[in-house]
Amino acid sequence: MARKRQTIDDRIKKAEEVVIKTKEKYDAALEELNTLVKKKKEMESKELMRAFEKSKRSFEEVLEFLGGTTDEDGDS
């Protein structure tokens, strides 16, 4: 019976190792995803700023179009 318990313990250890390696791969993939999403947002922000700089619209007109407020109280 001791042999069977050893086998189960070995299988548990191997399963733990698989989980650890899988988690490391998951964490690396998640970090890459977060980096790419952040980079995309930065690129979109830069593109938006370039479009605004080329635009003939005022800051207030752009905010109004985007649904933002045009005064400091938050009332538009």
Image (cartoon, grey):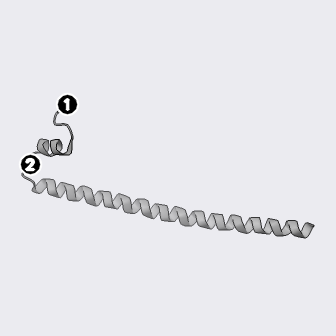
Q: Residue at x 59, y 62 (%)?
A: 23
Left or right of 50: which side holds 30?
right
Q: Residue at x 54, y 63 (%)?
A: 26
Image quarter of the C terminus: top left
CA gap, disc 2 and disc 1? 20 Å
Instruction: Check disc 1 and give the amino acid type.
Output: Asp
Image quarter of the N terminus: bottom right
Instruction: Check disc 2 and give the amino acid type.
Output: Arg
Other-residue count near label 2 (Cα within 10 Å), few / some / many at <14 / 14–19 / ≥20: few
Other-residue count near label 1 (Cα within 10 Å), few / some / many at <14 / 14–19 / ≥20: few
Q: Nearer the viewer, residue 65 or 41?
A: 65
Left or right of 8: which side holds 54?
left
Percent coordinates x, y for residue 10 in the rendering = 79, 69
Residue placed under numbered mark 2 in the picture:
57
The image quadrant of residue 41 is bottom left
Left or right of 59: which side holds 22?
right
Please report contact status of discs 2 and 1: CB closer than 8 Å, yes or no: no
Check disc 2 and report its element: helix, strand or loop.
loop
Residue placed under numbered mark 1 in the picture:
75
User: Which badge, 2 or 1, comes first in the chain's sequence?
Assistant: 2
The image quadrant of residue 17 is bottom right
Percent coordinates x, y for residue 28 in the rendering = 51, 65
Count the marks: how many?
A: 2
Q: Residue at x 40, y 61 (%)?
A: 35
Check disc 1 and report its element: helix, strand or loop.
loop
In the rendered image, the residue lying farthest to the left is: 56
Percent coordinates x, y for residue 72 in the rendering = 19, 32
Left or right of 19: which side holds 6?
right
The image quadrant of residue 6 is bottom right
Q: Which mark is residue 56?
A: none
